[in-house]
């Protein structure tokens, strides 16, 4: 602070002391405070920062001058959904994970208030990577539950910065969701785009396995070993899918402010079906790369990616370390609507059979070969001896299948249980319609039926067997216990399964 | 133990025990037996209120080169459970300067006993058996002195908290670890549940975890404060990496959390989940 400014403060305080009289003690405190805070620059216009919850981003800063920006961020510890049926006590900056997006301009003086909600169990603080100074603000913002801290910093360096809680044990605070992004826009602003979104990746170390329902605890052992059951975008499995998917229209340019909270894993960030036209790696301000498929984002780091969407459809955001995407939740969606652009992407034009053999599928030799193989197969099947042997083989295999599943209800002797499970042995229902019987095995059967004159009303679930196994077991039941109802081939089962 | 204390305890216990027995329809001889049982409970409670902790040692979470790895802790007594709203009400009844409307702002933040209905009325949010919270260090210390006791030191408190359900070292007990960590995974319920109900540790002390944070007499020595940090060469703060430099047991997350919590406090602070218990 300039000396004349200090003088101004002191004299102001002195005037205040004179006016208030009995309030002299308070006034002297103000002097202390004023001289202890040289960053106070009262000339600056004061602005309240607009904070947004992910995936939304505050509007671009239009002003061309420096301001004193007041940021008020509340820490709340809250049970929220981590996945369907799975809950977790998230520790949040602003009520959600990731924390509220903060947007200021290079050179702004940021007056930062950190409020720790009275219901919080833990003290918290904030380390903003955008701050130049010890702890990035953490040393000045350590706040007990039900208290509030204030500190002020000048946003010296433009860029996209991660902020996070830095209270011990730090990995736990971060693993519980305490991270977010602060954008310090360069003085001249960022290039205009049509859409801006905020996506942040983080992993969760739950005591239960992925998908285990109920309120999950933080597991310090898994955290130390870096074995998270969940790796997600924006704090929950499915936070960016369905109705919550990001939206854009054909022809628009999208900018993603992508950050990784961690606490431990980096992200191989990729959008399936798109190419990043421009990447500002590591959240810096220099455009260093164009036409990027996958950009690596470190834990506690960020990146700006921009791309124009030319073709309508759904684009999938993933961490291309793919087990995280397909098994742990790191999946998001960008839905692009608008007219098709066949020149850029045609959609499926041809769907035809491909025979992966060495010789040309259309050659005369291969056609002749296929004919002979078919003829041989026909000749074998026509031979009654061979047909009988193959029926016996089928029955033996079918018996095994029968004794793994069917016998429990229909009984080993095929007589079923009176009024509950209909008989198969000497069953008029089975004999009358082979196809109907196969359908019962393939697709299940429920509702009233009459077998040998007696009513049954029960439910048979579809049986999870291969077509071959069903042909076997059907052949078995149609020829066991004195039945002589014929055989069932795999082709017949396939036909039923297809619904022909 | 002072006689006044015993008399008070008996009064409270009688109120709680007898109606239950009467409701069950005891009569005649059974009633005599029940009364005897109740009296026995009262005696047992008076005796059991403080637990004798044999001499032992405390291994501080943070240590600097040259400091001893463990600190000897002499034998002492500690309350079996945290001080309750009901007990604290007696204190403010007898010590009007600690009532909510009269307490000096130097000694307690605004929010002191804010969950009570009034100066001498607990109300629904502060059940008599629940631990008292929203009390400053000054108030906790005054209560302890009134009882002829004192606040435990960090070393004493941690010595007791390190004991598990079945062994001296709770850190190696899977069940105890899960119990301690489980508390951090759930929001603080309102109103708080009763004190002295949860499973006791091997020493017979309850609620060292799982209910509320607790004041210790030397809470402000947990870490070097922000102001004096500038005067020391070593940054002993627990922020970010610095906390990991001097800590001995990097995987003892609950100890980190307690140290972190204590270091966020000032003596006039009141916190909705911070109570205390006494030692002697």
Image: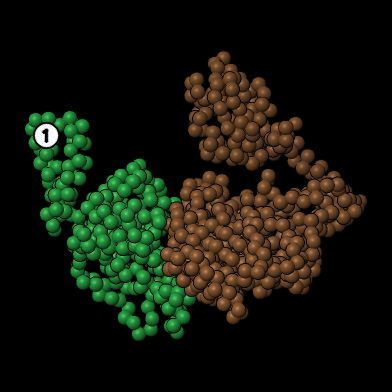
- Farthest-out residue, top: A453
**Quarter residue B53 falls in:** bottom left
Residue at left 67%, top 33%? A488
Horizontal side, residue B199 vs residue B266: left or right: left
Tell me the residue that label 1 is attached to: B31
Instruction: Where is residue A65? Give x, y as percent.
Output: 73, 68
Residue at left 86%, top 47%? A339
Compare residues B127 and A202 and report the one nearer the observer.
B127
Residue at left 44%, top 68%? A24
Compare residues A494 and B55 and report the one nearer the observer.
B55
* Chain under numbered label 1: B
Q: Quadrant of the C terminus of chain A?
A: top right
Horizontal side, residue B51 vs residue A356: left or right: left
Horizontal side, residue A83 vs residue A368: left or right: left
Compare residues A486 and A421 and report the one nearer the observer.
A421
Q: Quadrant of the N terminus of chain A?
A: bottom right
Judge whether A473 appears above or below A270 on screen.
above
Instruction: Where is residue A326? Give x, y as percent.
Output: 63, 55
Q: Is residue B202 visible?
A: no
Instruction: Where is residue A155? Give x, y as percent.
Output: 65, 71
Residue at left 36%, top 70%? B220
- Identify the element where label 1 is drawn: helix
Rendered hue of chain B is: green
Q: Is residue B224 visible?
A: yes
**Chain drawn brown, letter?**
A
């Amino acid at each position: 602070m300039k000396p004349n400014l200090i003088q101004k403060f002191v004299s102001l305080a002195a005037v205040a002391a004179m006016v208030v009289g009995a309030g002299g003690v308070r006034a002297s405190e103000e002097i202390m405070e004023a001289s202890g805070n040289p960053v106070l620059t009262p000339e600056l216009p004061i602005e309240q920062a607009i904070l947004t919850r992910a995936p939304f981003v505050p509007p671009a800063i239009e002003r061309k001058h420096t301001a004193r920006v007041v940021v008020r961020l509340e820490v709340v510890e809250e049970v929220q959904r981590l996945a369907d049926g799975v809950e977790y006590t998230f520790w949040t900056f602003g009520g959600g994970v990731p924390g509220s997006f903060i947007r200021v301009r290079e050179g702004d003086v940021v007056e930062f208030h950190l409020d720790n909600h009275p219901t919080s169990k833990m003290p918290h603080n904030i380390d903003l990577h955008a701050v130049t100074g010890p702890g990035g603000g953490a040393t000045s913002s350590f706040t007990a539950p039900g208290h509030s801290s204030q500190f002020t910093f000048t946003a010296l360096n433009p860029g996209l910065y991660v902020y996070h809680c830095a209270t011990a044990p730090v990995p736990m605070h971060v693993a519980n969701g305490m991270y977010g992004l602060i954008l310090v826009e360069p003085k001249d602003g960022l290039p205009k785009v049509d859409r801006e979104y905020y996506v942040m990746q983080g992993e969760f170390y739950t005591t239960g396995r992925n998908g285990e329902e109920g309120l999950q605890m933080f597991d310090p052992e898994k955290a130390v070993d870096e074995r998270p059951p969940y790796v997600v975008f924006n704090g929950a499995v499915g936070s960016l899918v369905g109705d919550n998917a990001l939206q854009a229209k054909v022809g628009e340019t999208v900018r993603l402010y992508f950050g990784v909270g961690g606490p431990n894993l980096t992200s191989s960030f990729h959008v399936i079906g798109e190419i990043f036209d421009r990447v500002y790696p590591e959240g810096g301000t220099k455009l260093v790369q164009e036409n990027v498929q996958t950009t690596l984002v470190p834990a506690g780091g960020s990146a700006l990616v921009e791309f124009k969407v030319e073709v309508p459809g759904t684009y999938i955001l993933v961490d291309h370390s793919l087990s995280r995407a397909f098994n742990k939740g790191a999946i998001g969606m960008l839905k692009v609507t608008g007219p098709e652009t066949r020149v850029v992407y045609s959609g499926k034009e041809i769907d035809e059979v491909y025979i992966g053999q060495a010789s040309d599928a259309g050659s005369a030799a291969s056609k002749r070969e296929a004919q002979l193989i078919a003829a041989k197969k026909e000749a074998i099947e026509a031979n009654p001896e061979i047909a009988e042997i193959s029926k016996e083989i089928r029955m033996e295999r079918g018996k095994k299948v029968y004794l793994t599943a069917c016998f429990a209800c229909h009984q080993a002797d095929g007589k079923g249980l009176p009024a509950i499970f209909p008989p198969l042995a000497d069953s008029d229902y089975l004999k009358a319609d082979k196809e109907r019987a196969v359908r019962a095995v393939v697709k299940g059967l429920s509702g009233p039926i009459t077998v040998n004159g007696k009513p049954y009303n029960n439910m048979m679930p579809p049986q999870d067997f291969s077509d071959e196994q069903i042909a076997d077991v059907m052949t078995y039941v149609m020829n066991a216990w004195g039945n002589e109802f014929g055989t069932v081939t795999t082709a017949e089962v396939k036909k039923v399964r297809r619904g022909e | 133990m002072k006689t006044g204390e015993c008399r008070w305890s008996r009064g409270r216990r009688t109120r709680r025990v007898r109606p239950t027995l009467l409701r069950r329809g005891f009569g005649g001889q059974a009633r005599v037996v029940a009364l005897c049982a109740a009296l026995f409970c009262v005696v047992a409670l008076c005796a059991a209120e403080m637990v004798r902790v044999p001499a032992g040692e405390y291994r501080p979470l943070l240590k600097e080169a040259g400091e001893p790895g463990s600190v000897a802790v002499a034998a002492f007594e500690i309350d079996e459970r945290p001080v309750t709203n009901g007990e604290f009400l007696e204190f403010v009844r007898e010590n009007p300067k600690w009532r909510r409307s009269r307490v000096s702002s130097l000694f307690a933040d605004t929010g002191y006993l804010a969950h009570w209905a009034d100066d001498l009325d607990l109300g629904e949010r502060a059940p008599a058996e629940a631990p008292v919270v929203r009390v400053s260090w000054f108030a906790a210390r005054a209560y302890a002195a009134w009882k002829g006791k004192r606040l435990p030191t960090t070393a004493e408190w941690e010595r007791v908290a390190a004991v598990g359900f079945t062994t001296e070292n709770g850190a190696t007990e899977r069940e105890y670890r899960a119990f301690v960590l489980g508390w951090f995974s759930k929001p603080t319920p309102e109103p708080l549940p009763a004190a002295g109900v949860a499973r006791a540790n091997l020493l017979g002390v309850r609620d060292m975890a799982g209910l509320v944070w607790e004041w210790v007499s030397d809470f402000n020595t947990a870490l070097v404060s922000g102001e004096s940090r500038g005067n020391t060469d070593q940054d002993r703060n627990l922020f970010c990496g610095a906390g990991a430099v001097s800590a001995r047991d990097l995987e003892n997350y609950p100890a980190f959390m307690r140290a972190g919590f204590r270091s966020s406090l000032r003596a006039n602070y009141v916190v909705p989940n911070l109570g205390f218990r006494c030692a002697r």
